Amino acid sequence: MSEVLQIWAALIVFAVIHTALASHGAKALASRLLGARVAEAAYRLIFNAIALVAIAPALYLAWTLPDVELYRFPAPLDSIALLIQGLAALGLVYSVYQMDWAFFAGLRQIIEPPANTTIESTSTARLVTSGLHRFVRHPLYTMSLIILYLVSPMTLNRLALVAGIHVYFWIGSIFEERKLVREFGDAYRDYQRRVPRLLPRLKA
């Protein structure tokens, strides 16, 4: 059980860092220290890089600490699970592409800053409601969870990691949507009413 607590502790550290960096205060501080133009250009890229470093300890612990296998998919379910994971991975990539992958990564802000965006902009420069976004508001989170929950063999540590990430995705989506409402106003509120948060509906 101590292994699970270590993983959750690492996830909490990641969540605190990730949430703090996404806050208005952190962005305002970056603007003061770096200057508004430099901060607007570089903040998203720096944010992503720090997020990757911050999540690494939790991933490392989940795969290296002493563990107990809970289950594994027998054939042919293992192949079916792998196929679904592959489709979810394609969906994840497509979702990022729809949102403008270069903006999401923080590269476009440096090379070619989009008009009408600021350091406060979220992961997308425009409101996307087509493609997978017709079925779920956060397809990136949903596709990631599908991949994670279908990991086989599933162990206690891995399940602890997945459950922690699921909780953070849910909580994080709430704060993210508050920013999206500020950015896109009534258009996003209408989108919220029509499309579910994380559990996709089958009919567009």
Image: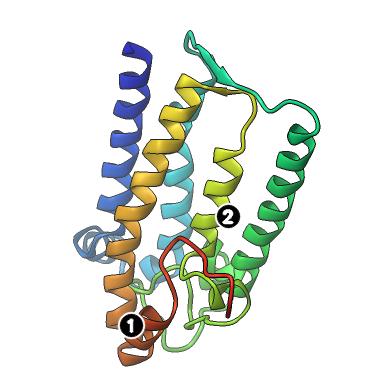
Q: Is residue 80 above or below residue 19?
A: above
Residue 28 drawn at (x, y percent): 22, 65
Residue under the point 61% across and 38% down = 150
Q: How many marks?
A: 2
Residue 172 drawn at (x, y percent): 32, 56
Label for residue 143?
Answer: 2
Residue under the point 48% across and 79% down = 125
Mark toward the start of the polypeptide (2 vs 1): 2
- For label 1, count other residues whose C-alpha is less than 10 Å away and answer few (under 14), some (14-19) or many (20+): some
Residue ID for mark 1: 183
Asked if one can make out residue 61 in the rendered structure from this viewpoint, the answer is: no
Quadrant of the drawing holding the C terminus: bottom right
Amino acid under label 1? Answer: Glu
Q: Is residue 187 above or below residue 88?
A: below
Amino acid under label 2? Answer: Met
Say which quarter of the image contains residue 75. top right
In this picture, residue 97 sits left or right of residue 43: right
Which element is circle 2 on?
helix
In this picture, residue 57 sits left or right of residue 167: right
Residue 166 drawn at (x, y percent): 41, 45
Quadrant of the drawing holding the N terminus: top left
Residue 16 drawn at (x, y percent): 26, 43
Residue under the point 48% across and 74% down = 124
- Camera-nearest residue between 94 and 126: 94
Asked if one can make out residue 158 in the rendered structure from this viewpoint, the answer is: yes
Which element is circle 1 on?
helix
- Camera-nearest residue between 93 and 156: 156
Label for residue 153?
Answer: none
- Camera-nearest residue between 116 and 1: 1
Residue furthest bottom as drawn: 186
Say which quarter of the image contains residue 102. bottom right
